[in-house]
Amino acid sequence: MATLELVDLAKRFSKKVWGVKKMDLEVNEKEFIVLLGPSGCGKTTTMRMIAGLEEVTRGTILLDGNDITDIPSRNRGISMVFQNYAIWPHMSVYENIAFSLKLKKMPAAEIKQRVQETADMVKIGELLKRLPGQLSGGQQQRVALARALAVRPRLFLMDEPLSNLDAKLRVIMRTELKAIHQKTEATSIFVTHDQSEAMSMADRIVIMKDGVIVQIGTPDDVYFRSANMFVAGFIGTPPSNFFTVKCIYNNDKIALEHSQFTLDLDPKGFEELKEYNGKEIVIGARPEDLLVVPDSEAVFTEEILVVEPQGSHQVVALNLSETIVKMIVSAEAKVKPGDNIGLNFNRKRLHFFNKETEDRIHLKNEVE
Ligand SMILES: Nc1ncnc2c1ncn2[C@@H]1O[C@H](COP(=O)(O)OP(=O)(O)O)[C@@H](O)[C@H]1O
Ligand SMILES: [Mg+2]
């Protein structure tokens, strides 16, 4: 168990190409951190620098307060699992897991016990004699996990370890990995580009874009208090809907004027919008925060374009002045394409963004 600190970390591959422009991050002991971001944002580069597989261009990496920036990879006490599991095909499962322990010159009896214990934990305890070629993809990934965990790393790094598994197995493995983490309590960093995987596994999520961090927070933080429009649009399925509106602020009423509707707010709790009086801002509304209401209570009415049944709920899509708006309604709701429905907003849950910077306009009384 360890703490990790990245200070002003950067990696430049060539004059024009930055893998990571700047990373500042403190990972607490036993924490499960998820690095989340679109392809090419610098997740793998960050992990490779932490593991010592990539030289840093600038900055410092501290493990338990000690500078390890220039320490060789093998001496860092860090284990890493990759997307392509890279287990040795000619070695049995047992030998694969035991390999690093033998390198460490651990006594044979102890190795045997450690291998069995770790294999049991990832549920391949019965497969120790098999060769990797005799295992399914999911089982091979478990071997890779066991091999990395057997050495009891101070820090456990996983770079998209579930990407090669089918959708159903991924969801199962999420839960198992979380359970393994609760058992081992190894400080962990997990990389994914899948926001739902990140939400379901992380203590804290680090959202990256173009080589920098755009938000660090708990799953609730990034969902309910998204730092900017990129995060609000990246987290959640379907993602947030955005509406550009003109803010007319009076002390007794705020009117947010969209080309198709006007949303009125009681200024209480929205005082921070005063400085945007007369200016355009962006409303972010999550699909569950658009509510179907009787026409008399509606902020606008619109025709349903498409209904997407999801079993537990339905996603209803509308076309509002050339923009697709998606909302979540209950499985029981009687909705079909062509129906006109009235909509209102769950005002307490709205996000507001500065239209120029796309950053969140923070309100004093944000949803906890
Ligand atoms: N070895 C390399 N040489 C040159 N550019 C690289 C190298 N590795 C990664 N990059 C570039 O660095 C950026 C970040 O890549 P990467 O860390 O792999 O992103 P991610 O893992 O988030 O998809 C990308 O623009 C990528 O093309
Ligand atoms: Mg990557």
Image (cartoon, rainbow, N blue to C red):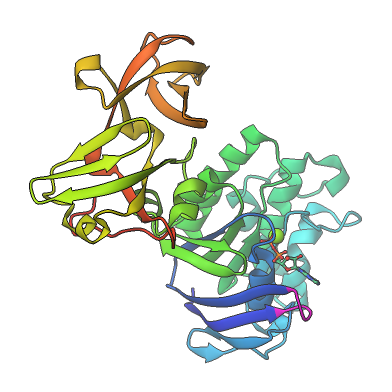
**Residue drawn at x 78%, y 39% as measured from the top left:** 136
Q: Nearer the viewer, residue 109 or 149?
A: 149
Q: Quadrant of residue 166?
A: top right
Q: Residue furthest right?
A: 90
Q: Nearer the viewer, residue 274 or 293?
A: 274
219 horizontally vs 246: left or right: right
Question: Residue 59 appears at what percent x and percent y?
Answer: 59, 87
Asked if residue 331 is positioned above or below residue 179 in the image, the reply reads above
Give the magenta range: 12-17
Q: Whereabouts is ligand 2, in terms of quadrant?
A: bottom right
| Residue ID at (49%, 64%) | 214
Q: Is residue 293 left or right of residue 170?
A: left
Q: Is residue 211 visible?
A: yes
Residue 124 appears left or right of 202: right
Residue at the image position 73 percent from the left and 84 percent from the top = 55
Q: Main secondary structure of the magenta part?
A: loop
Q: Let me know if residue 131 appears in the view.
A: no
Viewer-side residue, 209 vs 197: 209
Q: Position of residue 190 (x, y in %)?
A: 58, 59
Would you place residue 47 above or below residue 140 in this image?
below
